Image (cartoon, helix red, strand yellow):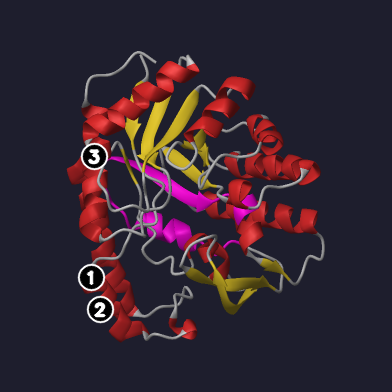
Amino acid sequence: MTELVATTPGLYPLPDWAKDELAELKGHQKGDLIGGDEGPEITDAYDRARTEAVDAQVDAGLDRVVEGQLRWDDMLAHPLTINDAVETGGIVRYYDNNNFYRDPQVRGELTPSGDVGAELDAVGADGDLQAVLPGPYSLADLATDEHYGDDADFLDAVADLLAGEIDAFPAHETLFLLEPSLVEAPPDDDTAARASEAIDRVAAATDADVVAHTYWGAVPEKPYAHLMDTDVDAIGFDFVADADASLYNINEYGTKDQIAMGLVDGQNTLVESPETVRDRVEWVDERTHTDFERAYLTSNTELFYLPVNKFEAKLEALGDAAALAEVDA
């Protein structure tokens, strides 16, 4: 029997009250975005919003609770844009959507800031904590290297940075490494091998189960084969954007004993029912014939694209789906 675990990749929408309050406190310009040195009033607003995000997950019955990443104005680039060795440049489109982030221009030796660990320390949730970080390949892909001068050295430095950040994390059950760039900007064969080594370096920094979660489609075959060489506990698949190619990778190259299934659309306001989510679990099961030890039921992407009411409804759908009778898988 497969253990079904309801969770999400994090990066949640801010409540409307928090958007209004923080707009007054922070301003509206590029330089007003989070830099890791916010004052007590801004910190208090984020603390209250975090409490709401955690409570929403607990109320929905999720098996893993994330911090919510509500401070991540720059989305997955956040661990760099708040780093002292980084200057933020112009506004850059965030993958292929209508969101933008500040270009993190790395101009010095990267050292851990402890910022993400401090966020996790503030959660205080009743439940199993799940940490969330960008994967090293995606974080390097989103950044501009003005210091290391070599792509391989830069990727190594980003991996070391993330591993150092993990050293400051409180105890956590699971770590999701978000790697959409493996789909959106797939590496060539040599780079794919280095990317997998970088993921291993980050994963080795924690005793938790590690999920390398990919989305906005399926990872091309060669990078996927390299991803299978990593020691992560699970690979995450986007069954919303490209179910057929995801199934092909699993059936052609295999996958880990655990799996993360991106079954709920993180960018569409249409709310899936728990029964629909479970039907999708069974659809994957019937077509892979793999005896998974654990399946993480999750949205395919981050959830900050959604209005708060739709976001909360999708949390409930995931929690209720996992609570239905276990399936043979």
**Label 2 crowd bin: few (<14), some (14–19), many (20+), radius 10 Å:** few
The answer to whether the residue labelled 1 contacts the one labelled 2, judged by CB atoms less than 8 Å apart, is yes
Residue 278 falls in which quadrant of the image? Answer: top left
Quadrant of the rendering where the C terminus is positioned: top left
Chain-order first, disc 3 or disc 2? 2
Q: Residue at x 34, y 57 (%)?
A: 12
Q: Residue at x 57, y 21 (%)?
A: 251
Question: Where is residue 173, by image quadrant?
Answer: top left
Crowd band around label 1 with a 10 angstrom C-alpha radius: few (<14), some (14–19), many (20+): few
Q: Where does residue 101 sit, x and y in percent of width and height?
A: 52, 71
Q: Residue at x 21, y 48 (%)?
A: 313
- Looking at the rendered structure, the kind of residue marked 2 is Asp
Magenta stretch? 112-138
Residue named by callout 3: 317
Residue 274 percent location from the top left of the image: 23, 34
Please name the residue that numbered disc 2 is placed on.
20
Q: Is residue 51 above or below residue 73?
A: above
Check whether the beta carbons of the residues at disc 3 and disc 2 lie within 8 A of each other.
no
Q: Vertically, is 54 above or below 82?
A: above
